[in-house]
Image: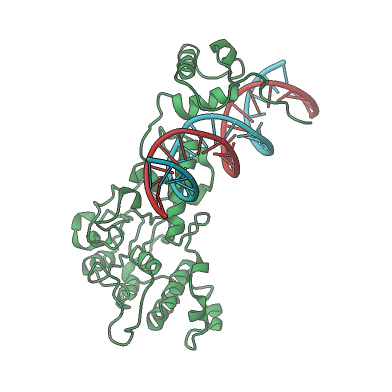
Chain colours: A green, B cyan, C red
Amino acid sequence: MGRSPCCDKNGLKKGPWTQEEDQKLMEYVQLHGPGNWRTLPKNAGLQRCGKSCRLRWTNYLRPDIKRGRFSFEEEETIIQLHSVLGNKWSAIAARLPGRTDNEIKNYWNTHIRKRLIRNGIDPVTHTPRLDLLDLSTMLNSAQFNLSNLLNLQTLVNPEVLKLATLLASSSNQENLEMILNNQMNQTLNPQTLVNTSLLAPSTQLLNQASHGQYFSPDMVDMNNLITNDQNLMPPDNHVIIPSVSTDHDQFSAPASDNASFQPSEIDNKYIQSFYFDSVLSTPMSSPTPLNSSSTLINSSSTDDDRETYCSMFKFDIPEGFEFDDFML
DNA sequence: AAAGTCTGCAACCGCTTTCTT
DNA sequence: CAAGAAAGCGGTTGCAGACTT
């Protein structure tokens, strides 16, 4: 059975709304409340179909709509919710007071989605795009071959494999193996990551971690994270492993034997922003002020260039997980 | 300065779900 | 329970303004 159109479109206006039309619609809704959209246009003296009126009201005229730029927290919320809910814009909008599904959808398509793609993250799966990586380097390795991988597959966290792949693409064999070997102990050891020298040490953070304290993903400025105590957040089932180059401006190649190591821009972004975050975390703290010396956010960055790093790597932290058990 | 291209967003379209009779 | 209407939803389009050549 075919569906009849929501209204007779003959003679009905389409396209942008005029101020006069907005006024009529607002006055009518304020007087009678929203709803009964089929009869509303006629009663309000509008040459529009009810559907158009409903859309105009819900997406634009509603008094509780928050207009203007999305805040950092809102953006983070959208990304996190999208990683769980997918394109359920109305469900996402329900968690963002004052924002409409249409607005969130538009913002996703025009800003967030592009940014994720630019950073090598699949906006659908929220995981790094392996097609961007050089798998051949890893697979051709004599020391690290496919059969080893297969033997490990039940033990290795797939997300860590992705990181490992990334590192492999940078020809850093030794560090890669260290990470994978530690994965055989079921969980990623932050000390090991740091010891690889791919990830410069943060003594302060490691001390905190070794005492079983976790950090919320204050994701933007990893440099601040290690230099500023107040950025270390209270336990919240979060772990961050900050991976900050020693000079803060350029990713450091391991010394001596790997002088040709040239990480790509994507490598830098991934590695420097590597952190763990449970998917359904509690709302995040306010972001750390951007540091102009950071590779991620530098002096030439505009507001629009605020990079989005959440949801890149997600790990569930097992209950009762203790870092002490895994310290070297 | 003009033409072409890009970008962001409001609005529309059509399908699905929910409600009403 | 079924049919029809209304509402909800997500994908897509069209256009105005910004930007680039």
Dividing the image into 4 quarters, which one contains the C terminus of chain A? bottom left
Q: Is residue A236 above or below residue A166?
A: above
Where does residue A4 sit, x and y in percent of width and height? Answer: 73, 26
**Residue at image location 44% in from the left, 74% down from the top:** A164
**Residue at image location 55% in from the left, 27% down from the top:** A15
Dividing the image into 4 quarters, which one contains the N terminus of chain A? top right
- Would residue A112 appear left or right of A228 to someone viewing this image? right
Dividing the picture into quarters, in which one does residue A252 lie? bottom left
Dividing the picture into quarters, in which one does residue A248 lie? bottom left
Q: Is residue A6 above or below residue C21?
A: above
Q: Nearer the viewer, residue A289 or A80?
A: A289
Dividing the picture into quarters, in which one does residue A115 lie? bottom left
Q: Nearer the viewer, residue A204 or A317?
A: A204
**Residue at image location 38% in from the left, 57% down from the top:** A309
Where does residue A51 sit, x and y in percent of width and height? Answer: 59, 25
Q: Nearer the viewer, residue A204 or C12?
A: C12
